[in-house]
C-alpha cells in the first residue's frame, strides 16, 4: 500500500501529537482505541459538513488507524490530487460504472491489512437512502464494518462497534441506521 499521512515515517507521529492537542483545545472527545487488526470497512456518518473531514482526520491519526477513504474524483484536481491521495484519498468517478465494489473486494484479498472509509450517505446533504456499496464490499470481502461517527451535540467523534454483515442487507442496514438515529452531525438539519 502507498504511503499516506497515516504511515509517513517521522511525520505521522508529529501530526498525531498536533491532532491530539487540537482536539483537546477545541473540546472534542474521541471514542475508540487503537486496533491491532486493521482489516475492515469503516463507515463515517452522519456526513453533514466539509468540517467532518479534518475532524475525522485528527481522530483517525489519534487512534493510529491507517485509512484509505473514497471521495468523488472532483476532489482530486491538479495540482491538489497528490496531496489528496497522500491524505488517504481514492478518487471515485460516480458518473460511470467502474465496479468499485469488486475492485475494493479484490484489494482486501490482496492485502492482509486494509481499512477503507466510506461515507454511506455519499453526500453532505440529507438523504433518505444510503448508498449500499460499503455493505456489499464488507459482505463480499468477509470483513466487518466499523461504525464511525461525528456527534456535534456531545462534541464526540470516533468509532463505536463492529458490525458483521449477515447477507440480509435490509435487516442489516436497518440495524446500522438505528445506531446513527440519535447522532447529530455538525449541520444537524442534514443528519
Image (spheres, rainbow, N blue to C red):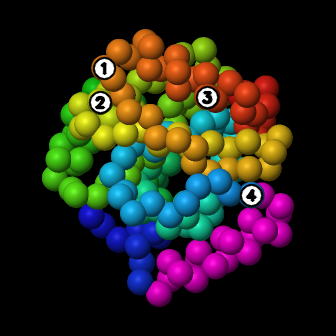
Q: Which residue is mark 1?
A: 167
Of the pair 169 and 105, the residue shown nearer to us: 169
Q: Residue at x 45, y 60 (%)?
A: 35
Work out how far the residue at label 4 is from the one at label 3, CA to CA, in angstroms.
19 Å
Q: Position of residue 137 (x, y in %)?
A: 31, 34
Q: Which residue is mark 2?
A: 139
| Residue occupied by mark 3 | 179
Q: Is residue 109 above or below residue 166?
A: below
Q: Is residue 20 magenta?
A: yes
Identify the residue under disc 4.
Answer: 29
Q: Quadrant of the N terminus?
A: bottom left
Label located before the other in sequence (4 or 2)? 4
Marks 1/4: CA–CA distance: 34 Å
Task: Name the element at disc 1.
Answer: loop
Which is more N-terminal, label 3 or label 2?
A: 2
Q: Is residue 179 left or right of residue 153?
A: left
Identify the residue shown where x is 68% and y is 24%.
181
10 Å crowding of disc 1: few (<14), some (14-19), many (20+): few
| Secondary structure mostly taken by the magenta-highlighted segment of the chain | helix
Residue 141 location (% of width, % of height) = 24, 37
What range of the chain is rendered magenta?
10-28
Mark 3 lies on a secondary structure that is helix
Contact flag, marks 1 and 2 (Cβ < 8 Å): yes
Amino acid at each position: 500500500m502507498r504511503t499516506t499521512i497515516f504511515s509517513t515515517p517521522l511525520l505521522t507521529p508529529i501530526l498525531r501529537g498536533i491532532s491530539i492537542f487540537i482536539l483537546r483545545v477545541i473540546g472534542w472527545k474521541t471514542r475508540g482505541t487503537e486496533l491491532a487488526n486493521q482489516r475492515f470497512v469503516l463507515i463515517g456518518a452522519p456526513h453533514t459538513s466539509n468540517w467532518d473531514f479534518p475532524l475525522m482526520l485528527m481522530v483517525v491519526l489519534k487512534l493510529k488507524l491507517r485509512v484509505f477513504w473514497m471521495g468523488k474524483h472532483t476532489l482530486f484536481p491538479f495540482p491538489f490530487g497528490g496531496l489528496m491521495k497522500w491524505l488517504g484519498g481514492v478518487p471515485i468517478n460516480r458518473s460511470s460504472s467502474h465496479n468499485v465494489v469488486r475492485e475494493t473486494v479484490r484489494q482486501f484479498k490482496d492485502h492482509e491489512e486494509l481499512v477503507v472509509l466510506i461515507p454511506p450517505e455519499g453526500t453532505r446533504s440529507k438523504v433518505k437512502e444510503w448508498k449500499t456499496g460499503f455493505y456489499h464490499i464488507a459482505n463480499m470481502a468477509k470483513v466487518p464494518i466499523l461504525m464511525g461517527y461525528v456527534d456535534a451535540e456531545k462534541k464526540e467523534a470516533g468509532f463505536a462497534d463492529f458490525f458483521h454483515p449477515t447477507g440480509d442487507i435490509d435487516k442489516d442496514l436497518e440495524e446500522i441506521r438505528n445506531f446513527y438515529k440519535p447522532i447529530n452531525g455538525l449541520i444537524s438539519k442534514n443528519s
